[in-house]
């Protein structure tokens, strides 16, 4: 067991889908650690709902004492959009060139639109976690990828797919549930649930 896999995302908020998938990938690929990296401004999503400070605090609360998980604030410390290309450049200086980056399958399709996508492919090994509903679209997605990336890069992405439990939880649904006054118990760790309520996150804007 060795090495760290980096798991980038908005984590607005972090939920059990992220945590279950992170653990499954660490076990399956033998990573000693998974480090969660919350984006400051996600290039493909624009503004976040909760500020970076809250998203970071929720991640820290979620990870707690789990020694296989870590939280890294490198993107929050950098102004402007959080391009994964730049992040991998920084990580390379600290951890060397053998980097692993975790991605949910829903993001895979969008990879060709990422900043310096072609070079990005060679900056890390991408580890891909399935999400409910994506398997039926897998061929179509790889077809799209092969129009943008080299056959070697597409092959590396295919090899990066890890069988993980398919967990139908999303931050979008959690924010909706909070807005509508529904329970988010069991969808997020208890400490995250408390944090959201304590800081009155994701509630409808007051008139
Ligand atoms: P939103 O609903 O706001 O789009 P999200 O639930 O997709 O958020 P992100 O923080 O955007 O969460 O996700 C970070 C990374 O984790 C992405 O690569 C995403 O594909 C992946 N991911 C999120 N939820 C799951 C899940 N339930 N199963 C597998 N991967 C997931």
Image (cartoon, rainbow, N blue to C red):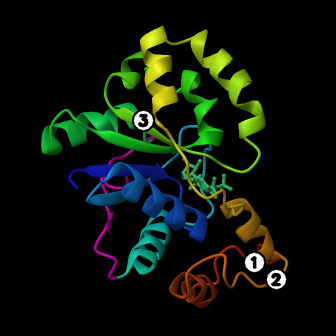
How far across and down, in percent of the image, does residue 88 sit?
A: 30, 37
Tell me which residue sits at (56%, 54%) in the image.
164
Picture disc at residue 153 = none
The picture quadrant where one finds residue 70 is: bottom left
Residue range corresponding to the magenta coloring: 65-81
Instruction: Report the front residue among 172 and 6.
Output: 6
Q: Is the magenta stretch mostly helix, strand or loop?
A: loop
Label 1 to label 3: alpha-carbon separation: 33 Å
Earlier along the polypeptide chain: callout 3 or callout 2? 3
Classify mark 1 as within 8 Å of ligand 1 or not, answering yes or no.
no
Quadrant into which the C terminus falls: bottom right
Q: What is the secondary structure assignment of the residue under circle 1?
A: helix
Name the residue located 37 percent from the left edge and 31 percent from the top edge.
85
- Residue 159 within the magenta-colored segment of the rendering: no
118 left or right, relative to 135: left
Q: Is residue 67 magenta?
A: yes
Count of marks overlaid on the render:
3
Q: In this view, does 101 lie to the left or right of 170?
A: left
Q: Which of 205 and 28 is in front in this view?
A: 28
- Whether label 2 touches label 1, CB < 8 Å: yes
> Toward the viewer: 66 or 29?
29
Q: Name the residue that disc number 2 marks.
A: 182
- In whole angstroms, how far apart are the C-alphas of marks 3 and 2? 35 Å
* Vertical position of residue 72 compared to residue 154: above or below: below
- Mark 1, residue position: 178
Q: Is mark 2 on a helix, strand or loop?
A: loop
Name the residue located 73 percent from the left edge and 22 percent from the top edge. Answer: 140
Q: Name the residue under label 3.
A: 126
x and y percentages locating residue 202 in the rendered image: 69, 73
- Crowdedness near tag 2: few (<14), some (14–19) or many (≥20) residues, C-alpha within 10 Å: few
């Amino acid at each position: 067991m060795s090495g760290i896999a980096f798991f980038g995302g908005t984590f607005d908020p972090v939920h059990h889908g992220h945590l279950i998938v992170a653990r499954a990938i660490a076990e399956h690929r033998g990573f000693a650690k998974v480090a969660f990296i919350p984006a400051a401004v996600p290039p493909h999503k624009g503004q976040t709902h909760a500020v970076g400070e809250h998203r970071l605090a929720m991640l820290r609360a979620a990870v707690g004492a789990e020694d296989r998980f870590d939280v890294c604030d490198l993107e929050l410390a950098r102004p402007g959009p959080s391009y994964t290309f730049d992040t991998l450049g920084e990580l390379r200086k600290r951890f060397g060139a053998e980097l692993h980056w975790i991605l949910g399958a829903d993001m895979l399709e969008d990879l060709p639109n990422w900043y310096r996508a072609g070079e990005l492919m060679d900056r890390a090994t991408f580890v891909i976690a399935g999400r409910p509903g994506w398997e039926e679209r897998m061929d179509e997605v790889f077809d799209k990828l092969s129009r943008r990336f080299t056959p070697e890069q597409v092959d590396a992405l295919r090899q990066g797919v890890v069988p993980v439990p398919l967990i139908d939880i999303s931050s979008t649904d959690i924010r909706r549930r909070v807005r509508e006054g529904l329970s988010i118990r069991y969808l997020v760790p208890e400490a995250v649930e408390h944090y959201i309520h304590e800081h009155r996150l994701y509630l409808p804007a007051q008139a």
